[in-house]
Amino acid sequence: MSKTFRLSGYGRVDRSRPVTFLFDGKPVKGYAGDTVASALLADGRHLMGRSFKYHRPRGPVSAGSDEPNALIGVGEGARHTPNLRATQVEVHEGLVAISQNRLPSLRFDVGIVNTLASPFLPAGFYYKTFMWPHGFWDKVYEPLIRRASGLGKAPTAPDPDEYGLHYAHCDVLVAGAGPAGLAAALAAGKTGVRVILCDENPEFGGALLSDSHSLIDGVAASQWVARTVAELEKLPNVQLLTRCSAFNYGPHNMVALNQRLTDHLASAPVGMPRERIWQVRAKEVVLAAGSLERPLVFEGNDRPGILLASAARTYLHRYGVLCGRKAVIMTADDAAYRVAIEMAEAGLKIVAVADLRANPNSAVVAEARARGIKVLPSTTIQRAHGHYRVGAVELAPVAADGTVGKGRTVSCDLVLMSGGFTPSLHLHCQARGALTYDDKLGVYLPGDSVEHVRSAGSCRGVYALDAVLRDGAEAGLSAAGGKGDLPVWTVTRQDQPGTGGFAGALPRRGPGHLALAFVDFQNDVTAKDVKLAVREGFQSIEHVKRYTTTGMATDQGKSSNVNALAIVSKTLQRAPQKVGLTTYRPPYTPVTFGAFASHARGDQFDPLRLAPADGWARAHGAVFEDVGLWRRARYFPRAGEDMLAAVTRECRMVRKTAGIFDASTLGKIEVVGPDAAEFMNRFYINGWTKLGVGKCRYGLVCRDNGFVYDDGVVGRVAKDRFHVTTTTGGAAGVLNMMEDYLQTEWADLDVWLTSITEEWGVIALQGPKAREILAPLVDGLDISAEAMPHMFLKEGTIGGIPMRLFRVSFTGELGYEINVPSGRVREVWDRVWAAGQPHGLTPYGTESMHVLRAEKGYLIVGQETDGTATPGDVGCGWAISKIKPDFIGKKALALPALNAPDRLQMVGVLTDDPQFVLEEGMQLVAAPQMQAPASADGHITSSYFSPALNRSIAIAMVKGGRSRMGATLYAPRLDAPAVRVTLVDPVFYDPEGARVNG
């Protein structure tokens, strides 16, 4: 192992566990606890990637999740994951990592020629360049753009890993386990409330793990972290989640976490998911997300070897890596001086600390000077030199009026920069929190939020360590209810935060028309790009973002947004708070698609629900179709039959003898309670209080806009109990709507709602022979026409199995729906089937069901209706109660517009050619050769060949349809003459209803 930049006595990596991994096919050695970035830096390698547009050499800028440059692909084959941050990927034995966005190799990338073309590729060039020639778009521009898009390559094979999803509740969720987060979790945990503490890193502690200076209660910061974590681990009410980032703050304190479980392991335990999404509902949330150090914007600031000062400190103290030999530090903040002191102690030669401020004079600055570190006030970096690695910088003096003088070039292999710290506001903003601008700090701070959330520590502009600990403890105790002792810690040897900091582009000498001073490293957005956007009229920061793509990279603008804001502010000569910030959208850090999909893939992506008689139907050769989530038998073909022949036979047998049909997919809801009848009266458009026990009624429910939402037959099982059926696809929606009204509008009603769709299976027995087949099977029930007329129900048993028997029909024939426990459907089905064989009982499917109901003019919600049809439009105006004081949709149904005579109304349609079957969706017009654009009079909603009538039939929605019976319309076709049709009553078969009442 090359130990050139690995220091003994530093770092938290486990040197007893060396590991070897591959980067771009070459072995690299590191230790357990290293990241890919730290291991490569220890090997003296800063070049880790290429930028998106210009393909410039790039190395890591940071040491955490805000890294914009060092993006790599990890894994092979189906387990390959692109665009991971090398600063976060933990090394393990056998890890395979590759660089991205380069051709043919990382060191030699032909895409670098784009840098030469940079003057011709400014912000928004693609809006202006690809407009001509017109024919080039499909053949040249689009293929090139698609080939160039993206940074990594997504795998094409199915992901073999498993992903978990977990729901959790807690009293206090603490996001971030730095000093403020640890203090908050401990303060809340000691009160006994349920606490979840999460942090995206493998270890808790945050910046304290890189702090070798401060003492807390007389011990090093890292030791205090270990003590605090041990104390938290002993609390049974506290759950600790490492490698777990809070990436989305939803309404009502629903916070989504993404936990990486096995990516750091060489061999994952069998059955353990790779990642787990946590959906946490928290009573209170404490955000302790910390702050992010800002990079400085100067020419050549993207060279490998130019890092944030805090990142170099992290690499030193967490990984034992010195990032270079000879460094220049550019700062506008005191924090960089502590870094300079510690780097010098570790053996790094500090050429100079260039400070943009005119008179830095804090205690830490004085300490740096006393240690012999050269401090250059009023100094800027004019430009950085180098290619694969920074080799020198030009330092230039800044006069009091802001002008930059002639500089001098100093050699170095490392540049550390610090523009101050920006509070991490992402989650606060996702929680719909307001922001306030602090003129003294020059940053936005969290304000009030509509959620139960509070921020603590540096994410709200509190920087001194003792104040951070106190702020975190107070936030945690407050979130826990405020009852308990406030933990107190004594901090010594801490640096007091300065009042410096700088945002925007550093002052420079000359106009810099060709200077590449990067604001957004990943998307190659420069300071001049942002200025150009403003000059071209984009004054809104959101417009500037989209025009330049700054802040739209995988780091979500963590390193670029504030600098872009400052440049826009200066260009417009407008205060930063007047410019504002772009919207912080989830996720805070990228989350894999696998984690989002969780178990919902393959067969579980679209779960298949099987009706209880599915096995019987498969055994009898059924052809199936998907209906919502259900798989249903569509028809039962015999040898040599196509669908039309099979459906024709099935329909004729139902009309002649009897048919059996699995109707279990119907939604079923039980409405129970002393106020059940009143609830039904308010929910449905028709009346229910006078419906007798043992009777059924067709029910129609509308939205509050008066439009039909669902329908079904309802049976009154007892005085306080209704058995409600819904359409197959409407079951969940109707139940949700019922719950919504019960809980928010009618809380005075004493009612319980229970879904019983899965509890009861339904066997529909339809046809003239239905009673003869069923009567011998039911136990002691009289189901004669006199004892059990149409729309009645009885409870009893069938072969000893509990049963609710409804005499209802969706075919227009004598019919029964036999409700039995779902697990017993097959037993009852087999008995009915056996009993029906002497009578010619035939199974029929959904296609025949549709034909049979259309012959009777029965509507199907969602087929005849489209969300804008009223009960009157579909011929159900008779169901609207005239005496009820109120029901859902009552006021809307009284509106003149919903009672206009020219509304689309349900009618029957017959073609002149009885053998021609119209296509569903065909438009109906007044003349056979109307020129487009033309206004349609209506459209076909259902169309079939009717075996009972031996001709085609259709149902349509036509303007003023009921007043136009006998009228002629035309159905245009694209490649043939229009089809002439006649409007008729939608009840084609047995209009008197004699058969259903038989």
Image (spheres, helix red, strand yellow):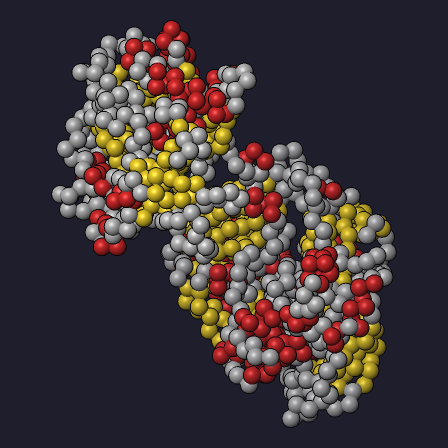
* Residue at image coords 74%, 76%: 119
Q: Position of residue 493 (x, y in %)?
A: 62, 70
Q: Nearer the viewer, residue 435 or 158?
A: 158
In this picture, is 373 found above or below 194? below
Which quadrant is home to the C terminus?
top left
Q: Residue furthest top?
A: 838
Q: Quadrant of residue 94?
A: top right
* Residue at image coords 77%, 65%: 55
Q: Is residue 355 visible?
A: yes
* Residue at image coords 22%, 55%: 896
* Residue at image coords 83%, 49%: 25
Q: Nearer the viewer, residue 584 or 906?
A: 906
Q: Quadrant of residue 840?
A: top left
Q: Is residue 82 left or right of residue 982?
A: right
Q: Nearer the viewer, residue 591 or 995?
A: 995
In this picture, is 795 found above or below 185? above
Q: Position of residue 148 (x, y in %)?
A: 73, 59
